[in-house]
Amino acid sequence: MTSGPTPTGELNTIPRLLARNASVYGDKPAYREKEFGIWQSWNWKQVSEEINALALGLLDMGLNQGDHVAIIGRNRPYFYWAMVAIQSCGAVPVPLYRDAVAEEMAFVLDHCSARFVIAEDQEQVDKVLEVQEGLNMLEQVIYLDPRGMRKYDRSKLHDYKEVQAKGRASGLQAELDARLAVQDFDTTCVMLYTSGTTGRPKGVVLSNRNIVKSGQAVSEFDNLRVDDRVLAYLPMAWVGDFIFTVGQGYWTGFCVACPESPDTMQADLREIGPTYFFAPPRYFEGLLTNVMIRMEDASPMKQRMFKKYMDFAKEVGPKLLDGKPVTFGERMKYALGNILVYGPLKNTLGLSRTRVGYTAGEAIGPEIFDFYRSLGINLKQLYGQTEASVFVTVQPDGEVRADTVGVPAPGVELKISDTGEVFYRSPGAFVEYYKNPESTADTKDAEGWVATGDAGFIEKDSGHLRIIDRAKDVGKMADGKMFAPKYVENKLKFYPNILEAVVFGNEREKCCAFINIDLSSVGNWAERNNIAYSSYQELAGHPQVLSTVQEHVEAVNKSVAEDEMLSGCQIHRFCILHKQLDADDGELTRTQKVRRRIIEEKFKDIIDALYDGSEKISTETEVTYEDGRKGSIKATLELRDAKVFPTAAQRIAAE
């Protein structure tokens, strides 16, 4: 047991919450990790000791207050402990995306002047060593996995567990306690870099006040408990992972489980059975696609039973979740459906025990959203951003809807500017952008109001917030009608065989679109229909695939035509791109958000062809392979017209 801060002190830092948890919840599980097929477990007392030893080891290596320490690796308890150990020393943890290439890492390491790096394995160490000559501040690298590290220069490389061992023998506990004692709400807790959709990522400085207050508020809002458990599988560099696993995890004392690898995540999810779960819409879309693919291969009897009970569940399931009245007969039929369909399906998805589930980051399709809620899974939407410590709005139980992102989270104030942009003020609002006072002033004013960059409005009756699109992406068509590409893109992505869509049309007479097909879904269709293909490019150009996507585009157009305000966003022409948009090629951020400007520049020839009426275009595109090598792919794309529909007003006028 460490001597650290007393659990009776004010719970205003993550290390003080750790001390509280070690004292009050000492024997309860805090972390679990699957390694070599076996689940390892640590209780809060053991975690406190592990963190204390690492903090002492970092002090022994010369870590100063205010230093920045980068963390690079997959979700493992050791890295979460490292973040709190760094905080305990008065330094600042800076988690990086593990799949970032060396050049991307170099920018962050240089920008934050990281003196230390804690890396997972040889692969991550090699990336750091590749760019170390340009990093004047970098002094030491600590690695967790020693495999492959035997012949490396040890002068600046240190084994994680050896650092802990030296810490235990260092005699620096008094120095660590002194550093812990002076920390408070205003001490920096973490620095997280934005995804950089429009330029270089910015370092978002978040204080203990931001993280602890946000973690407390929404934990109490959703009645999270010490016996809850979550699966930590999202990138540690993403604010959502930090608030769910550290902010809420340390406030409530619940257990954080880490999968063995990204490849085993779904199997590990089923074994853990999280009671609190977050995933982006793309994850839920992928799960549903897999379910539908499996049902297409099932027997006719199973298909009929699945359809019968799912159609019934869509009517009754959400009512049961929201506490609305249903008849005794409906309850009995739903219970039977739970035995035959819903229960086994939830078990397959790994969501049997989920009390609270959240999705955010993009709009989720109403059909997908309703599917999970019809199963009895309490899936809700939230709206947030890195600068808000995640939470801006949340959906209260009983007020869950697919078309809004909920009401202001506890302690959050909202307002809409004259231009339609959403602003908020909250305890979670970030301190500043590191080394960027101009951007800080542009984003947060003197009264604490933060500009989200999103356009939206608050419903008068319900107080729920509805998001239209990114404010910078909302424009006007040539005829003056609103152009909101994300609204149409999300409708397209509701179809399981469309993975990504990018719509163009600002200040133009009509809209055109790029489509990425979902290789898993469309590939399964091809296999079932004995259609041979050797690559994504070949499948994307198949006439039947093009015709199917055209049907989807026209169905979306018909739906968009019903919205008088956005009816001008119907897609007149489209093509299926010859490659998947990829973060390694700069077309997406590491959080899978579209970099619209880069795509417009990179594929300008295809956009021009869509607008000049060409039926085909030959193009060549540079790509980055997994090993970092550059190459190019050539393709001839078919460009198709799509049917557009009159609005209700136009139909009435025509009559």
Image: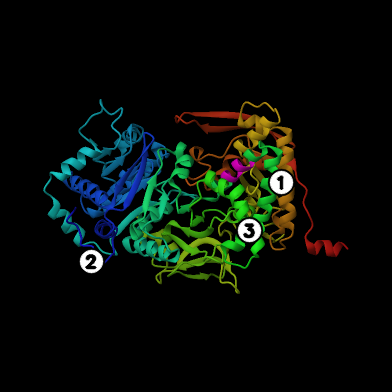
Q: Nearer the viewer, residue 141 or 309?
A: 309
Looking at the image, which residue sits at the far right? 655
Q: Residues within 10 Å of mark 1 (few under 14, many from 20)?
A: many
Residue at position x 50%, y 46% in the image = 350
Measuring from the top left, give residue 70's x and y in whole percent: 31, 45
The outermost residue toward the bottom is 461
- Identity of the amino acid at label 2? Gly
Residue under numbered circle 2: 9
- The residue carrying mark 3 is 332
In the visual, does 286 lie left or right of 32? right
The colour scheme used to paint the residues is: rainbow
Kindly identify the amino acid type of the residue bearing the numbered disc 3: Met
Residue 287 image position (x, y, % from top left): 56, 44
Residue 42 among magenta residues? no
User: How many marks do you count on the picture?
Assistant: 3
Would residue 391 appear left or right of 542 to someone viewing this image? left
Q: Which residue: 41% across, 47% down? A: 232
Q: Which residue is mark 1?
A: 552
Q: Which residues are magenta?
A: 286-292
Residue 494 image offset from top left, x and y in percent: 64, 49
Q: Secondary structure at mark 2?
A: loop
Viewer-side residue, 183 vs 81:
81
Asked if one can make out residue 593 in the rendered structure from this viewpoint, the answer is yes
* Camera-nearest label, 2 or 3: 3
Q: Nearer the viewer, residue 338 or 357?
A: 338
How far apart are the alpha carbons under marks 1 and 3? 37 Å
Locate the C terminus and report the quarter of the image it occupies: bottom right
- Which residue: 27% across, 49% down? 47
